[in-house]
Amino acid sequence: MPYTSSIKAQGDILVLDEVLAVGDEAFQRKCDDFFTEIRKDPTKTVILVTHDMNSVKKYCTRAMMIKDGEVVAIGDTETVTSRYTLANLEAEKKEQQANREKLEAEHQYPNGLNERCPILRTFPVKDAIYTSSDVFQFGVEYQFDEPGDFYLAIAMHDIRRGGITYDTGAKKIKMTQHGHHTVYFELPLKLFNNGEFRLFTSLRVPTPVDPNNTDMVAVG
């Protein structure tokens, strides 16, 4: 049902399917106003179908997670959205592992890696979901056997809003151990607004013609 028709219909039960994923800024503001007002009316029920967990937390009082046509979770929004996010992260992890195994069998390197740097992986030390009061701990596993100086550059990308939220810079983290190692970092989340973020690490070496700059060897 189109959004405009839903407003005119004023039914007791409205089903809105991914309505927050379309439209321009003005349309999104209209959606926000509509949800804000309709929540004040106890006689109205809105079923919001969406993959945007931030919208679920903002607009909904209860949540249901459906997988392969079956209800796998129902309850408060915080619990269900956390389970949904973890399920997607687990599925993504399995897909990445399957891709790595396929590439290894074919003697190829994953995207961003190569013979010079066959391993470069950024991963959370503990949970995958945090609050703004937590300190995020993560590790970077790498393998780099070439002699000489090299650096790790870490950037945090805002998946939902776009852009780079945090960047260490190309020559801030100078490494001292060549070979296969894992190093660990901490990041206080109180510095950031709520959202969905992804960390990327690039391994870099000094540019031969300009030692003040660096060239990227790999990213992961």
Image (cartoon, rainbow, N blue to C red):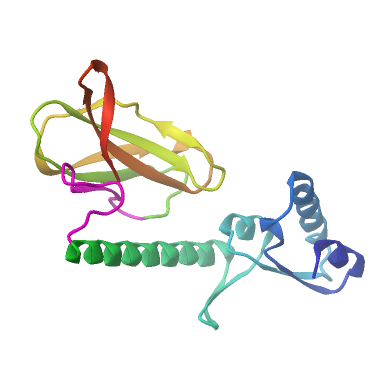
Residue 111 on image: x %, y %: 31, 51
Choose top left, top right, bottom left or bottom right for residue 88.
bottom left
Residue 209 on image: x %, y %: 23, 17
Does 56 sit left or right of 140 as displayed? right
Q: Is residue 180 visible?
A: yes
Does 182 sit left or right of 129 as displayed? left
Q: Residue at 20% of width from left, 64% of height from top?
A: 106
- Specify whether residue 6 is painted magenta: no
Q: Start and end of the magenta stretch?
A: 107-127
Q: Residue at 55% of width from left, 48% of height from top?
A: 160
| Closer to us: 186 or 114 | 114
Does 19 sit left or right of 105 as displayed? right
| Closer to us: 213 or 127 | 213
Q: Using the image, determine if residue 166 lies above or below residue 51.
A: above
| Closer to us: 178 or 64 | 178
Does 174 sit left or right of 45 as displayed? left
Q: How many numbered discs sit on the rendered protein?
A: 0
Q: Residue at 27% of width from left, 54% of height from top?
A: 110
- Specify whether residue 125 is painted magenta: yes
Residue 191 on image: x %, y %: 46, 33
Choose top left, top right, bottom left or bottom right for residue 135.
top left
Q: Is residue 171 visible?
A: no
Question: Which quadrant: the N terminus?
Answer: bottom right
User: Residue placed farthest to the bottom in the image?
Assistant: 70
| Closer to us: 191 or 85 | 85
